[in-house]
Amino acid sequence: MFAFVISRILQAIPVLLTVSLISFAMFAYVGDPVAIMLGQDFTEAQRDALVRDLGLDQPFWVQFAEFVGNAVQGQFGLSYRLSRPVAELIAERAPATLELAFCAAVLSLAIGVPMGVYTGLYRNSWLSRFFLTFSLVGVSLPTFLIGILLILVFAVWLGWLPSFGRGDTVQIGWWSTGFLTWSGIKALILPSITLGLFQLTLIMRLVRAEMMEVLRSDYIKFARARGLPNRVVHFGHALKNTLVPVITIVGLQLGAIIAFAIVTETVFQWPGMGLLFIQSVGVADIPVMSAYLLLIAVVFVTINLIVDLLYYAVDPRLRIGRGKGGH
Amino acid sequence: MAAVVKRFFDSDLWWSFKRSPVTVLSAVVALVCIFGAALAPWIAPHDPFDLASLNLIDAFKPPVWAEDGVAEYLLGTDDQGRDVLSAIMYGARVSLLVGLSATAFATLVGVSVGLIAGYVGGAVDGLLMRICDIQLTFPSILVALLVDGVVRAVVPREVHDQIAIFVVIFAIGISEWPKFARTVRGSTLVERNKEYVQAARVIGVPKLRIMATHVLPNVVGPVLVVATLNLGLAILSEATLSFLGVGVPPTQPSLGTLIRIGNDFLFSGEWWITIFPGVALVAMVLSVNLLGDWLRDALNPKLR
């Protein structure tokens, strides 16, 4: 187990280094930070002093090492657009994105898994057909259109839910939460559905396919032959084995949720990291972009690591195979 | 030529096409979209770029079936009195153009990388596939956004507006190539040990030529399927980028740009400005995706 964890962590390091190299290259070579920081009037001496201050006269690898060192401490410099530390900006907006992603993930799991089980068990019922057609629509509709349609129906026509922003938030330390006020919860509903709908249909289709596959296997037939009731066979035997691949996909999709949060946040003017990023892309605010890139990479690598470990914990075959020293 | 046509109508492919009503329907929808887009300058009822013909009196007309609808503007008009239907046709043109070019670009890069990785093998293969893996961990829309953002930072604004459409094509193409590389590498690994390749190697055909004229034709089948499925995705990526305001410039609006512009009028009740381009986008993507699904199943001998 220990060796497995270590080898996974070692595999993650080159990925992170590559991404930080790209991120650093953007930081260092795209645009001219000196020109941007100096403004219009400056002397040659001022320029040189700033170059030395920023360490820009150092060799490439020294600068890169310094960049990584700063990044590990969470320092990414100042945003060109807002002239504030990037780390501060991101920390301020992280709660909004994380709460949104959390709600979307919970929503897609809580609805997607039961729908998948149902359509897998009762393949020909009209409700299954309805779910499948619905999932096709969910896959084909782009995220921003789902958001626009939801706004049109629930905010403009019916007027039930707010169409933008987070509503009232409560500050707990540095974390601002929307869970504790009624308007905050109402503001979460539409964005979460928008963000979660694609994942929901994906999970449903996956669970359905796995369920159908598992139900055909010998041990299910054996369980039925033993006269076990349907409930035990379906949920005790079948569902358990269905969930192994679901863990992987859900883990990997968490990354996609964070990426597509960019789109959802734009549609709903949700004050999260995605909106910050898109505003930065629009005006080429490199420090924010490179910090965001690095942050996303860390999140993705961590998720992959956790998924691998979960897999290891859930699937006993992996452990036995390793114990014997073979594959 | 006639023989080729006859062979096509006798083929399994045509047979499975005829037997699936959903596929026939999506082919019809796809063709309508493609022709409507390609022939827009000739068949569109109005020219949305001809400022002289725009009349502010015609602004915000609802679709023809609504109370104040005018037969002249089937799907209504936007804030400047532009015909929504014509704008959609011109927008679909941009969307399709970007989608096709980006897919072609991704295919070119992906197929070349896949062929080289699969045929040369060894350290080259390892390196190229590692790059693939790293890129595949990130959602493609994020990669496209970053590429677009970097180009925006490097290129001055005046130049950027002129080359924006190429930047978008490049960004989407770069974000999609690993899928092609993976597919081609897999089939190349199988092909390179076959006798015809060994024979070619024995008689001294140069490596590049073996790859291009011997291996390539035999690995192209799966690429076709990936490309079709990818076309829908590329169109969606373009629409998403344009919706976020970092795609094609507003002077050359694509469907995504039209949706973004129309989004501002959602709250004042002019829903048709944004919903109809959305419907057109979904129709186009859905029909292309269904065609891709069908092609994948029809070309898969295991499912026959």
Image (spheres, grey):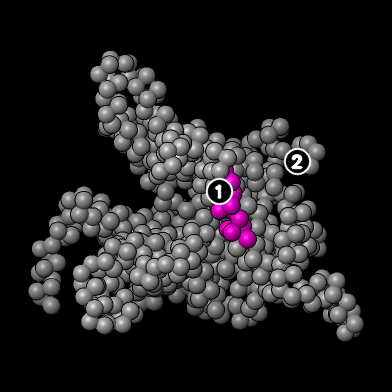
Pointer 1 and pointer 2 on the same chain: yes
SS at circle 2:
strand
Q: Is residue A127 left or right of residue A47?
A: left
Marker disc for residue A7: 1
The secondary structure that dominates the magenta segment is helix
SS at circle 1:
helix
Q: Which residues are magenta?
A: A5-17
Q: How many marks?
A: 2
Displayed quadrant of residue B115:
bottom left
- Residue B130 horizontal/vertical position (percent): 49, 62
Q: Residue at x 12, y 64 (%)?
A: B9
Q: Is residue B141 left or right of residue A98?
A: left
Q: Residue at x 49, y 38 (%)?
A: A312
A235 up-or-down from B65: above or below: above
Q: Chain of mark 1?
A: A
- Asked if the stretch drawn in magenta spans residue A148, the answer is no
- Asked if the stretch drawn in magenta spans residue A8, the answer is yes
Amino acid identity at mark 1: Ser
